[in-house]
Image (cartoon, helix red, strand yellow):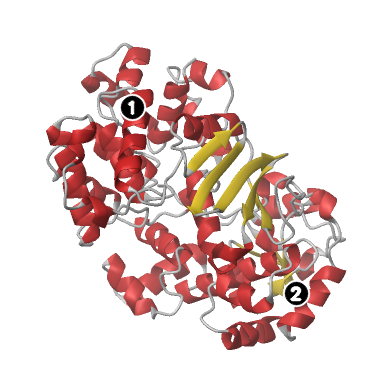
Amino acid sequence: MIPAPLPAVEICESARLSRDSRFDGRFIVAVVTKGIYCRPICPARPPARANVRYFLTAAEALDAGYRACLRCKPERASILPEWTLASDTVIRAMRLIGDGFINDQPVSLLASELGVSSRQLNRLFKEELGTTPKNVLRNQRLALAMRLIGDTSMKLLDIAYAAGYTSYRRFNDEIGKVYHCSPRELKQRVCRNNIGASMLVTSPATSPTATSRDIVLCLPVRQPYDPAWIFGFLGKRAIPPYESVQGLCYKRSLGPGIHVQVDWQADGIRVQIPRACARNTGDLLCNVRRLFDLDADSRIIDDNLNAHSVLKPYLAAGGGLRVPGAWSGFEVGVRAIMGQQVSVQRATRLVSAFVDYYSADGQFPLPGVVAGENPSHLGMPRSRGLAIQILAQRVTSNELQLSDTCSFGSLREQLLAIPGIGPWTAEYIAMRCGRDPDAFPENDWVVRKHLSMSAKQTRLLAETWRPWRAYALMYLWRGK
């Protein structure tokens, strides 16, 4: 991937003075005289150029001693796209940090997981993000805490744990260091400064199905974004009773009588979380971001793909297609194996039968439940059932991690080592579980039909679409 450093000062100046929304989330504006950092679209009167400093990320600005603006709320901005990072190590590290890997662990453990030294990891972060992994985590916690303080009626103790703090004392200390007040005082200040919303990502309107105890948050989405595509994709593969899609509304069960709801609202994704899951809010939001691919930059991706004559007709039907991710890696792995050489409808029926047989509570079965039995009796070839069984065994024993924090190459190698898993399945899992933007099943039947090519010809053609082949696949799957 080609790194995209901080835009030139002239570009930053023009963007902040015009409040250009295309740059929201792409850089941070720090105001020296006030000691705060803002989004480029902050509605406040623009400060003089001499009083402005620019940073690539909020974490870098926080590290420099600035605090978040209570008016434009930088925590509401879109996340910096991964394509701006040159190092796969930094990308994996950012994903692990987002999953809370070092919430209460030293950076050395993160470095060990990535196969580098702590010194090397800190150097990579400094080079690409201008800060350290610890400060990225610090900013991430504060950003989520600020969202929950400003947009919900959650108890401060629940906010502390939901944001990733291991104790209320640490939360209180962090707020004190950055904002020079207690969390309760900060909440009062945030409420007083809750203005200028018309120019920014606003607090979500209450859902008709939401109760007064539900947590409702709106996640920003870079435009263009085609909600009909991703909700439709998930709808065709939804498995009752734990999953359903109606129009632009996705529901997923978290347990008996408890579910999270995700729907499209104007220009963002609204997430409704039951109060019983308040302390898991951070994890649930991460799952939603992955599943709906919220952090991609479709403008850049589409521009690159549209430069290829073969793909141009497919993008002419509308841009903004995203690659659906995975709520559960094991679940998508099982779906991929069952989907080999059968239609989406047939695969969905098989998965439904799988859930009915192995689940006692209507949720997708845990890998440990499946590890002791070949599920081929549900109506699939024995070799396919054996692949699912081995997959379950390796996930249970931690030999295989079906997540987006794995090395792309390592994930494919481990999957292909399982008898019954071929290149198509490995690429599909790498695309959805591993969130590899360049994953591409060259022998996919739909792709070959659209292109009228052999698998080898398709592979050679798709080489020119790198590093966005997974997004090209979405356009081919949608068709002209």
Quadrant of res 430 = top left
For residue 66, side relative to residue 128 (left or right): right
Task: Return the x and y of residue 21 as percentages of the image width and height.
Answer: 72, 46
Q: Say which of 32 and 371 sits in front.
A: 371
Q: Is residue 282 left or right of residue 387?
A: right
158 vs 170, nearest the viewer? 158
Q: Residue 437, image x and y in percent? A: 40, 41
Q: How many marks?
A: 2
Amino acid type, callout 1: Ala
Q: CA distance from mark 2 to mark 1?
A: 48 Å
Q: Earlier in the sequence, mark 2 or mark 1?
A: 2
Measuring 60% from the left and 36% from the top, which residue is drawn there? 225
Residue behind mark 1: 462
Give above or below for 449 relative to 206: above
Residue pointed to by mark 2: 32
Q: Picture quarter containing residue 298? A: top right
**Is residue 162 visible in the rendered structure shown here?**
yes
Q: Which mark is residue 158?
A: none
Q: Is residue 400 visible?
A: no
Give percent across and percent down for residue 306: 51, 25
Say what secondary structure mark 1 lies in: helix
As drawn, is 62 to the left or to the right of 97? Answer: right
